[in-house]
């Protein structure tokens, strides 16, 4: 290697691999001193802050490209056309530009009319270190705070033990777990729906997507190996260091795409996608708690069930035979249960699996190869039959039998587009519904935007024919409208509400920037009313008044075993539809009761239910098992009863079966025969 | 934190997957812009041509063939920069750009005075001006090697030359740049 070109390249390679310039220069042969000057100049060029394109340009250019992608996709579906058009023709670029300008005009005007800052998401809450950057400024990060806005092109990363809840304008949420990295490619409001696309490069995220009413919205989570697209559901995404992605669905259905093929993943199922591969066939999940009966190199006996252990199984600590553990994993086939994680726990053993009903017997049911004892106390949701996918919550009896506490159907909405045309409804003059907003007043405290409460609309009529049809809810901001950007009711229309039937809706409020500066105690009043009912349009019911009061003072948190809410065994008194009070229990001894920090199952549950990790671990440290915590939050979501009240019921001595029964929705009053038509 | 572009991502991009194409754009649009900026010396032109390059990439992706199966990302990167080169050549043709003159043929070669000029500190503006006076191949080599940080192999693949020729070219380019920088003073 005597040629100067070779020597130069050799020294440059050393510089490029990180060797200090001084060291490299010291190695320049004395008879080649000119090389030192060249190396110095090359080093100077490398260190200059070379310009970036303008951020606005990068965004515009990306939008232009996206427009072209849609165009090209259409061309690709018609190969004959593509051959004729050749390379992207100038007129197509012009068309994209014109379309983009036209779209900006329309969307801009629409946003102006709405008077809101659209196309953003908001950091609803965060724990730990959360940082944001933009794609056009790689390497530049700044800390995010609660209430910060996230725009298209922003990227967010979380530190260890850190989580963030990002909320979109329709109330949908993305919850980012520790050590995650997500790029928010697109955040757009479109009519009443959202278009959200994000790329999850690392870590874990969980998503609650408000169903799109008119199917115009999109919600896509892309990863290095697969893509999930949904129309309203709850699911989580893990991206592992290997590049493998795992998509797990809690509710609804998710379309997962790999290299080219796609699979539908239903509630309770999970699929893995390896880089460059197609999605695996979806499998069902389980999580159960029990004592270890055997420990073999490749499988453990837990709660009487043989569970396979793989090299990828995460095992916390070194649990021994007899220890209580919480294990979660996947059911890969008959008698093949694979553990993804095993962690030591305490508390009452409440477990759950998802699977398919194979046989309904009395008193035993067969679900995914497991026999469950089903008693008259088991709550079985409507429509459960053979072949129905279900979630079973169960406890293990001393006899070793698995007692089903509840069996819930997971049959939910399909992601197939719903018919967009509204069915033509004909008024029924004989129907005399009696709609009522219950209660007629709700009071809630809010600090950050958005905030939401849940209300009920009940058809109080008793006669079977007195159904309500074509019901639509509307809203108006009665006081301080300047503090509100928009109010959204989800759902806000029902084709039919039968006598005795009650429907639940969520009223979400996005406050304006002025809300941030509003003083404590400022109130915003919103009226919700029945804007349409076609059978008795002349007889619309009263209104629901919702008062949001600004309160940014931290809510007192229960500590230790102190629960301020009085436990009650009479659920009727706890079912008052007042807004859920956010309670963050503080662990008494954070480091002594959690084991690992963060605890993997605690993280999983925090993501699943969109609450801070500390809140989950607060309950855990009070002695509740992870299965119990999972069940309590699940019940809270279903019933609307605050989770602290559910834990209080448990602390009062009620069993989970009775709690679940007490929280179950009331069945409509029995329809009495109607001798003659009215009117 | 950037992770390698996976084979599946590239396959999905070829199949027209929106996210995959976005990923490609995000990954390389800044580098393409810088390449074009230093070659044209014109910020607006660099932005316009960058957009054009990625539209061409989008349209040609279905025909992209991975030449280095062990390093798909390098193949794709070299391919994108080849498109950038050709788009730039078209741009120059349309704009009837005058050819640059090889400075080494016209400047005095005394090395002593050059030192002080070069040592006075290199700025973006000085670099841009000095680069504009170099022959195209030298300028391109410097941009790819030292501004974008391409290794010899990627520079050679992008410029469709042998690695040995790039090794020689990069030195000659640096020598010419020193002269060009001195001449700016």
Image (spheres, grey):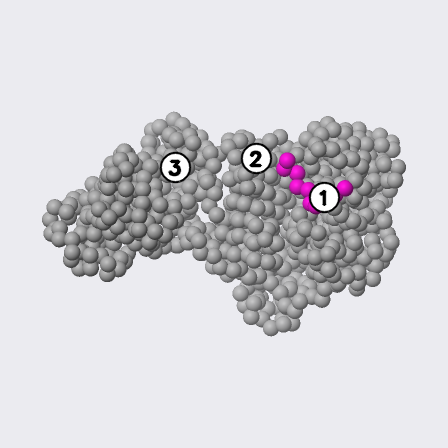
Q: CA distance from mark 3 to mark 1?
A: 44 Å
Residue A14 in picture, x, y percent from top left: 35, 45
Circle 1 chain: A
Magenta range is A311-320
Q: Which quarter shows the N terminus of chain A?
A: top left
Report the residue at 63% width, 72% height from top. A520
**Vertical side of A214 occupied by A131: above or below:** below
Mark 3, residue position: B74
**Label 2 marks which chain's residue?**
A
Name the spot of residue A440 as percent of width and height, x first: 73, 61
Q: Which mark is residue B119?
A: none
The structure residue drawn at horizontal position 70% and vertical position 28%, both measured from the top left corner, is A333
Residue A262 position, x and y percent, is: 56, 32
Task: Identify whether B5 is placed above or below A55.
Answer: above
Q: Residues within 10 Å of mark 2 (few under 14, many from 20)?
A: many
The chain to which mark 3 is attached is B
Give B42 or A276, whichever is nearer the viewer: A276
What separation in Å lies between label 2 and label 1 (alpha carbons)? 30 Å
Circles 3 and 1: CB atoms closer than 8 Å: no
Which label belongs to residue A318? 1
Q: In this figure, which residue is indicated by the disc labeled 2?
A: A273
Residue A167, percent from left and from top: 58, 54
């Amino acid at each position: 290697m005597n040629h100067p070109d070779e020597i130069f390249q050799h020294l440059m390679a050393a510089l490029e691999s990180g060797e200090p310039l001084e060291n490299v220069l010291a190695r320049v042969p004395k008879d080649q001193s000119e090389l030192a000057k060249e190396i110095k100049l090359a080093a100077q060029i490398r260190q200059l802050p070379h310009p970036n394109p303008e951020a606005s340009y990068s965004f515009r250019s990306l939008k232009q490209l996206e427009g072209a992608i849609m165009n090209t996709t259409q061309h690709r579906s018609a190969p004959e056309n593509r051959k004729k058009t050749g390379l992207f023709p100038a007129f197509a670029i012009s068309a994209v530009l014109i379309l983009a300008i036209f779209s900006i005009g329309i969307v801009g005007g629409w946003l102006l009319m709405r008077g809101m800052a659209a196309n953003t998401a908001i950091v609803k809450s965060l724990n730990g270190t959360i940082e944001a950057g933009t794609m056009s400024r790689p390497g530049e990060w700044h800390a995010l705070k609660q209430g910060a806005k996230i725009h298209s092109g922003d990227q967010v990363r979380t530190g260890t033990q850190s989580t963030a809840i990002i909320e979109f304008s329709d109330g949908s949420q993305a919850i980012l777990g520790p050590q995650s990295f997500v790029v928010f490619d697109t955040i757009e409001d479109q009519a009443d729906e959202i278009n959200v696309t994000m790329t999850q490069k690392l870590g874990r995220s969980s998503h609650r997507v408000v169903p799109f009413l008119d199917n115009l919205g999109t919600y896509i989570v892309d990863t290095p190996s697969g893509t999930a697209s949904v129309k309203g559901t709850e699911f989580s995404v893990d991206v592992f260091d290997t590049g493998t992605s795992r998509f797990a669905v809690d509710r609804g259905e998710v379309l997962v795409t790999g290299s080219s093929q796609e699979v539908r993943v239903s509630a309770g199922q999970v699929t893995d996608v390896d880089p460059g591969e197609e999605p695996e066939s979806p499998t069902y999940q389980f999580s159960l708690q029990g004592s270890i009966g055997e420990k073999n190199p490749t499988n453990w006996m837990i709660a009487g069930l043989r569970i396979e252990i793989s090299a990828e199984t995460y095992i916390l600590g070194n649990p021994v035979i007899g220890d209580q553990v919480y294990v979660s994993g996947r059911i890969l086939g008959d008698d093949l249960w694979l553990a993804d994680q095993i962690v030591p726990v305490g508390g009452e053993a409440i477990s759950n699996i998802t699977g398919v009903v194979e046989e309904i017997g009395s008193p035993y049911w067969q679900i995914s190869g497991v026999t469950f004892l089903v008693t008259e106390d088991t709550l079985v949701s409507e429509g459960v039959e053979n072949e129905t996918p279900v979630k079973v919550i169960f406890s293990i009896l001393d006899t070793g039998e698995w007692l089903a506490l509840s069996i819930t159907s997971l049959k939910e909405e399909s992601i197939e587009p719903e018919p967009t045309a509204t069915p033509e409804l004909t008024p029924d003059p004989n129907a005399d519904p009696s709609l009522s907003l219950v209660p007629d007043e709700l009071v809630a405290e809010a600090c950050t935007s958005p905030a939401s409460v849940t209300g009920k609309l009940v058809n109080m009529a008793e006669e079977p024919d007195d159904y309500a049809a074509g019901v639509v809810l509307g809203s108006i901001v009665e006081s301080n409208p300047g503090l509100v950007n928009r109010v959204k009711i989800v759902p806000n229309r029902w084709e039919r509400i039968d006598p005795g039937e009650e429907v639940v809706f969520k009223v979400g409020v996005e406050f304006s920037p002025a809300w941030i500066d509003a003083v404590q105690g400022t109130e915003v009043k919103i009226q919700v009313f029945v804007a349409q009912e076609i059978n008795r349009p002349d007889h619309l019911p009263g209104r629901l008044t919702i008062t949001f009061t600004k309160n940014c003072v931290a809510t007192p948190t229960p500590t230790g075993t102190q629960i301020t809410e009085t436990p009650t065994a009479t659920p009727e008194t706890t079912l008052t539809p007042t807004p859920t009070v956010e309670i963050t229990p503080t662990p008494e001894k954070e480091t002594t009761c959690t084991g690992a920090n963060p605890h993997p199952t605690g993280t999983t549950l925090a993501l699943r239910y969109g609450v801070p990790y500390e809140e989950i671990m607060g309950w855990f440290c009070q002695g509740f098992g992870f299965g119990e915590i999972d069940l309590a939050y699940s019940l809270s979501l279903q019933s609307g009863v605050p989770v602290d009240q559910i834990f209080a019921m448990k602390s009062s001595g009620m069993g989970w079966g009775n709690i679940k029964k007490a929280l179950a929705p009331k069945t409509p009053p029995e329809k009495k025969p109607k001798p003659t038509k009215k009117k | 934190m950037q992770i390698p572009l996976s084979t599946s991502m590239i396959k999905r991009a070829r199949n027209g997957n929106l996210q995959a194409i976005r990923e490609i754009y995000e990954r390389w649009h800044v580098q393409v812009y810088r390449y074009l900026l230093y070659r044209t010396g014109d910020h607006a032109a660099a932005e316009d041509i960058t957009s054009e390059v990625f539209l061409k990439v989008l349209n040609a992706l279905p025909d992209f063939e991975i030449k280095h199966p062990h390093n798909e990302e390098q193949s794709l990167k070299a391919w994108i920069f080849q498109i950038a080169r050709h788009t730039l050549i078209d741009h120059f043709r349309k704009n009837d750009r005058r050819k640059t003159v090889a400075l080494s043929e016209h400047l005095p070669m005394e090395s002593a005075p050059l030192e002080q000029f070069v040592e006075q500190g290199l700025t973006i503006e000085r670099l841009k001006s000095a680069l504009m006076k170099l022959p195209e191949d030298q300028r391109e080599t410097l941009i790819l090697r030292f501004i974008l940080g391409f290794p010899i192999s990627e520079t050679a693949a992008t410029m469709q030359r042998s690695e040995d020729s790039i090794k020689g070219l990069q030195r000659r380019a640096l020598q010419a740049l020193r002269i060009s920088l001195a001449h700016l003073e």
